[in-house]
Image (cartoon, rainbow, N blue to C red):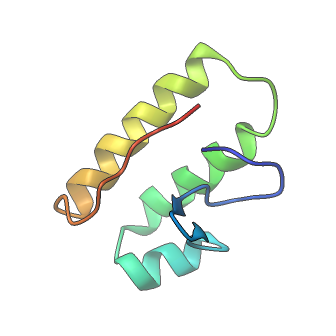
């Protein structure tokens, strides 16, 4: 879910999980490439919602699930 000022828009029930892409790499062990793409999407999504951003989010969710071997439940909420 996107939010203004949030670079890594990944949330748990307690709130925002990571403050930056490096923390995502360090804590969850995802690739730097994926973390960079998540940050890029997080920044782009702070503008108007578009079908393209939704499609990119769906692709990022699939990549996160793959790299994390489905250890976490990841969903996209526009």
Point 51% across, 64% down: residue = 13
Q: Residue furthest bottom?
A: 26
Determine the image quadrant of residue 60. Answer: top left
Specify whether 23 is left or right of 61. Answer: right
The quadrant in which residue 50 appears is top right
Extreme residue toward the top, this view: 51
Of residues 39 and 14, the one drawn nearer to the viewer in this rendering: 14
Image location (x, y in percent) of residue 70: 19, 58
Q: Name the spot of residue 12 as percent of width and height, x first.
A: 50, 64
Q: Is residue 43 left or right of residue 78?
A: right
Residue 55 against residue 63 in the figure, above or below: above
Residue found farthest to the front: 13
Q: Nearest the camera: 31 or 27?
A: 27
Q: How many marks?
A: 0
Task: Work out whether residue 73 or residue 53 is closer to the camera in this orientation and state it.
Answer: 73
Question: Where 66 falls versus 69 (above or below)?
Answer: above
Query: Residue 48 at x, y = what percent?
Result: 80, 24
The residue lying at 60 percent from left, 44 percent from top is 1
In the rendered image, residue 6, in percent from the top left (x then y), is placed at 74, 58
- Give the quadrant of the C terminus: top right
Q: Residue at x 71, y 23 (%)?
A: 49
Residue 40, compared with residue 57, is above or below; it is below
């Amino acid at each position: 879910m996107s939010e203004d000022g949030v670079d890594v828009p990944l949330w748990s029930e307690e709130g925002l999980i990571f403050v930056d892409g490096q923390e995502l790499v360090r804590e969850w062990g995802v690739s730097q490439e994926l973390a960079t793409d998540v940050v890029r999407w997080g920044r782009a999504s702070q503008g108007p919602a578009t079908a393209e951003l939704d499609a990119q989010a769906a692709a990022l969710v699939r990549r996160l699930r793959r790299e994390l071997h489905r250890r976490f439940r990841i969903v996209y909420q526009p």
